[in-house]
């Protein structure tokens, strides 16, 4: 599990670096670079990978917001050959945006009812 947490920390740092250098378009490019191949998934479960990201967020040197956490989660899952999708949504009143990760149409790094609270703006 230590190796997985270290890998998740690496993706959190990489995500923050890409956000600072190029904004949302850089994150979009990062996700495109890690498209999940059409091969058998790893022996790890998506739950184990999400737990590693959660632990890495606790160890991270500053607060991790949902976009950074979700991009890192999606990249980690894709690295382990799961076809994860990052979803960004928003609601109007009161305005709030949120990001989460779905795997085969199911939310895996947040509450399952999150898509009902936000209108989907982007899926990648």
Image (tube, grey):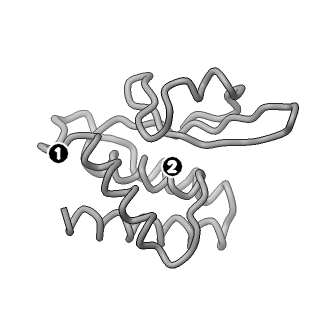
- Write down the residue under mark 2: 70
In the figure, 101 relative to 58: above or below?
A: above
Q: Which is nearer the eye, 108 or 39?
A: 108
Residue 117 placed where, x, y %?
68, 26
- Residue that extends furthest to the bottom in the rendered view of this protein: 61
Estimate the x, y position of residue 79 in percent, counting from the top left. 30, 51
- Give the structural element (helix, strand or loop) at label 1: loop
Q: Tell which of 9 and 58 is nearer to you.
A: 58
Which class describes the residues within 10 Å of circle 2: few (<14), some (14-19), or many (20+)? Answer: many
Residue 55 vs residue 100, the one in the foreground: 55
Q: Residue at x 87, y 31 (%)?
A: 93
Q: Which residue is mark 1?
A: 44
Question: Viewer-proximal residue, 51 or 26?
Answer: 51
If the image is split into quadrants, where does the C terminus sit? top right
Q: At 60% from the left edge and 43% from the top edge, which residue is drawn?
A: 99
- Residue at the (59%, 51%) spot, across then down: 66
Question: Tag 2 or tag 1, which sits nearer the N-term?
Answer: 1
């Amino acid at each position: 599990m230590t190796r997985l947490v270290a890998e998740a920390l690496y993706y959190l740092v990489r995500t923050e670096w890409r956000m600072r250098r190029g904004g949302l378009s850089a994150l979009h490019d990062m996700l495109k670079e890690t498209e999940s191949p059409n091969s058998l998934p790893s022996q790890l479960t998506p739950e184990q990978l999400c737990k590693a990201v959660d632990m890495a967020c606790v160890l991270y040197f500053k607060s991790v917001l949902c976009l950074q956490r979700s991009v890192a989660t999606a990249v980690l899952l894709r690295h382990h050959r799961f076809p994860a999708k990052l979803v960004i949504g928003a609601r109007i009143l009161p305005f709030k945006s949120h990001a989460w990760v779905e795997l085969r149409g199911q939310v895996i790094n947040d509450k399952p009812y999150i898509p009902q609270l936000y209108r989907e703006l982007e899926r990648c």
